[in-house]
Image (cartoon, rainbow, N blue to C red):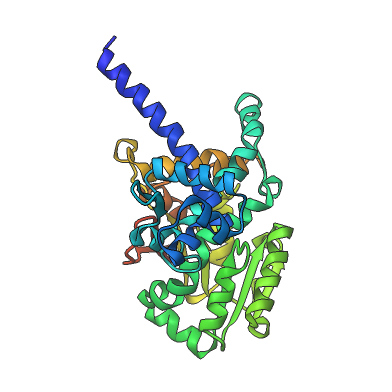
Amino acid sequence: MDKARMKAMADRVFRDVAGGMAAGLAWLGCETGLFSVLAERGPLGFAALAEASGLVPRYVEEWARGMVAAGYLDYDPAAETVSLPAEHAWLLASDGTDHYMGGLFGMVPPLMAVAPRIRTAFREGGGVPFADFPPECRHAIDLMNRGNYEHRLAGYWLQQLPDTVARLEAGGRVLDLGCGNGQVVVALARAFPASTIVGVDPDAASIAQAHAAVADAGVGANTELVQATLDAVPLDPPYDLVTACDCLHDLPDPVGVLRDVRARLAPDGVLLAIEPRVADRLEDNVNPLAAMFYGFSVFHCTTQSMAHDGAALGACLGPTRTRALFAEAGFSRVDEVDVRSPVNLFYAVRA
C-alpha cells in the first residue's frame, strides 16, 4: 500500500470529523446568539462573552476555544480575547439577509437525528417521510432560504422574466409548489399586491407555519394556502407563474407533478424551477459544495422519495437530467435563467 496516500486519507478523516464538530459548534453559535454578540461587541474574554450572552460560562469558554481551533474566531493570546472577523460576521451574524449561511448548520442536528432510520432503510428499503423529520429541519430550511426569498426572488430572480413581472404587477396568479413555511408566498405577496399568491404543500406542520408567516407579514388579503398535493388544486383559473423552489428532486413522482403544473399554467405562463447547482458528471462534482449536496440528498431528499416508493432522484440531478424531466412532462421550451448564484440553477420552463 501507498503509505503517503494512507496518511493523506487519515488526515482527511480527521478534517471531515472536525468539520462535523465545527458545524455543530457553529450551529450553537447561531442558535444561542454568540456570533451576534461578538459581531456587536468586538473582542471579548471568555467570561465577558458569557456575561454578554447570558449563557453558562463553562460552555461558552469551551465553545469559543473550539471555534478558534476551527478557524471561525480569531484569538489574541496577549489579551486573551476572541473576536469574530467582519468577513465571518457577514456570513454568520446576518440572519435575514441574502448572504446568511447559518441555516446550513441548522440542517446537521435534524438530519443526524434520523440517521439511524436511514441506516435501517439502507438494509431494508423505504425511507423517512418529511413529516417524520424533527421540527428543527423546517426551521433550518427557513433560515437557509428566507433572506434569499425576501431580498432576491422578486427584486432579482424574477426580473429576468420581465413579461411575467408585468403580468403580476397588473394582477396575475402565482402558485408556489411545495410552499413549506410560506416564505416564497410572503415575498411574492408583498412584491405583487395586485396578484393572488397560492401556496400548496401536503405537510400539515409546514402549512401551519406558513399561515403564521402570512399573518405576521399582513399579506392574507392576496394569499391562499392549501394543504394538499398539486393534483387537488383546481385547473381553473390558471396561473401566470408557478414556482418550484428546490423541491422537484424530492418528489416521489416528479414527472407526474410537472404534468400537473403544465395543465395549470396560463397561456404564456412560466414555471420557475430552482435546483441545486451541480454538474452532470460525477467527476466534475468532486468539491465541497457537491459533497454537501450529496449528504443532504442521502439524509433528506432521496429518503423522502424512497419513503413513498418514488423516483428518488436526489439533490444532484444536474442540468441534463433536470431538462429531461421537463421534456418528459411535455414542456416545449426550457431556458436557463441568467442568475448569478453559487448554489442554485434557475430554469424558466414553458408549455
- Residue drawn where x is 38% and y is 77% of the image: 159
Q: State whether residue 221 is above or below residue 212.
A: below
Quarter of image, res 327: bottom left
Residue 32, image x and y in percent?
58, 56
Residue 200 makes an appearance in the image: yes
Residue 103, image x and y in percent?
51, 56
Q: Image check: 281 left or right of 133? A: left
Q: Image check: 317 left or right of 305? A: left
Q: Nearer the viewer, residue 204 or 27?
A: 27
Q: State whether residue 15 is above or below residue 90.
A: above
Q: State whether residue 189 is above or below residue 62.
A: below
Quarter of image, res 233: bottom right
Residue 147, image x and y in percent?
48, 68
- Residue drawn where x is 55% and y is 48% of the image: 60
Q: State whether residue 65 is above or below residue 336.
A: above
Residue 351, image x and y in percent?
46, 67
Quarter of image, res 153: bottom left
